[in-house]
Amino acid sequence: MLQEEAEIVALNALTWLASEGLLDAFQGATGADRSQIAAAAGQPEFLGAVLDFVLMRDDWVQGVCDAQDLPYEGLLRARAALPGGDLPHWT
């Protein structure tokens, strides 16, 4: 997946979080307020953090992927295409 495609997936994931009432949980995990989220939404590093957050729960992965008509492994491919996605995962 190209970085540009991954950014779109991550932006759609952020939209999904907001639509599902999970933006407060994301804010709590990141410490970012809504204005900071809006300002950072175009930054690939921040979008990687969005996908890291979604990837914490299988039901969130399923919801995001279903909303975007992506296979469930699509979020992992998107995460790998963004900065920091090439780091080893220890889980």
Image: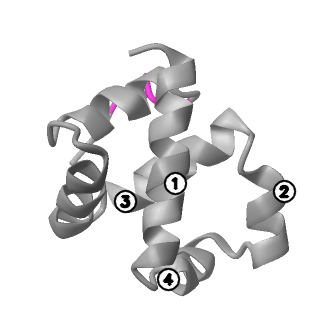
From the image, give the main secondary structure of the stretch colored magenta. Answer: loop
Q: Mark 2: which amino acid?
A: Ala
Q: Residue at x 39, y 30 (%)?
A: 78
Residue contact at pointers 3 and 2, CB within 8 angstroms:
no
**Does residue 33 sit above or below 81 in this rendering?**
below
| Residue beneath disc 4 | 25
Quarter of the N terminus within the rendering: top left
* Separation (CA) of disc 3 from disc 4: 11 Å
Q: Nearer the viewer, residue 60 or 88?
A: 60
How many callouts does the rendering have?
A: 4
* Separation (CA) of disc 4 from disc 2: 18 Å
Q: Which residues are magenta?
A: 84-88
* SS under mark 2: helix
Percent x, y of residue 47:
59, 44
Q: Mark 1: which amino acid?
A: Val
Q: Residue at x 84, y 56 (%)?
A: 39
From the viewer's perspective, is 73 left or right of 68? left
Q: Mark 3: which amino acid?
A: Val
| Residue beneath disc 2 | 39
Crowd around label 4: few <14 · some 14–19 · many ≥20 (10 Å): few
Crowd around label 1: few <14 · some 14–19 · many ≥20 (10 Å): many
